[in-house]
Amino acid sequence: MAISFLTEDTAFRFTGRRKTAGWLRRVAAEEGCTVGSVSVVFCSDAYLLQVNRNYLQHDYYTDIITFDDGEPDRRIISGDLLISVDTVSSNARQFGVSFDDELDRVMVHGVLHLIGYGDKTDPEARTMRTKEDYYLAKRE
C-alpha cells in the first residue's frame, strides 16, 4: 500500500507527501479499491512529451499520462502517474486556480483512471470531472 512521489527532469520539490498519499488512499477506498503500488512522477513538459511520443504515439503536450499496472478487477490499483509540472502550472494560470489545486486535480484524475474511470467521451469526461470535484472537496 505505497504511494511514492518522484521527480524526473525537473527541479520541482513536492511537499505534503504524507497528507496527499493519505487523501489518495481514501479516494481509492471510497471507490472500493486499495492502493497497491502507485508512483507519482513529477516531470517537465519535454520529458512527458517524449513519453507521449514513445509509448502512446501522441505528439502533443499533456498534464498527465497514467500507466495502469493494476489487476483487471481494479480492486487493487497500481501504476504510474507521470505529471508535467510545467503544464499544470500553465493550466492553473489559464483556469484561474492555484498551482496546488490544479496539481491535486491532476493527481486525483490519475488515480480515478487507475480505478477505471475514462474521459474519452463527453459522458465519461463529465463523470470524471464530477468525481474530481467531489474528491477535491474532501481533501483535509
Image (cartoon, rainbow, N blue to C red):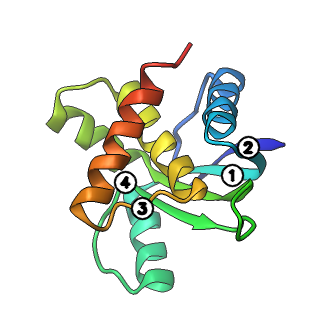
| Distance from Cα at disc 1 to Cα at disc 2 | 5 Å
Total label count? 4
Mark 1: few, some, or many residues within 10 Å (few <14, many ≥20)?
Answer: some
- The earlier-in-sequence mark between 3 and 2 is 2
**Residue at which label 1 appears:** 39
Type of the residue with mark 4: Asp
| Distance from Cα at disc 1 to Cα at disc 3 | 19 Å
Q: Are marks 4 and 1 in contact (CB under 8 Å)?
A: no
Q: Are marks 1 and 2 in contact (CB under 8 Å)?
A: yes
Q: Position of residue 97 (x, y in %)?
A: 25, 25
Q: Nearer the viewer, residue 85 or 63?
A: 63
Which is closer to the viewer, label 3 or label 2?
A: 3
**Residue at which label 3 appears:** 118
Q: Nearer the viewer, residue 86 or 78?
A: 78
Residue 7 seen in this snapshot: yes
Looking at the image, is 113 positioned above or below residue 47? above
**Residue at which label 2 appears:** 4
Determine the image quadrant of residue 22. top right
**Which residue is drawn at the image coordinates 26% and 57% (left, top)?**
123
| Distance from Cα at disc 4 to Cα at disc 1 | 16 Å
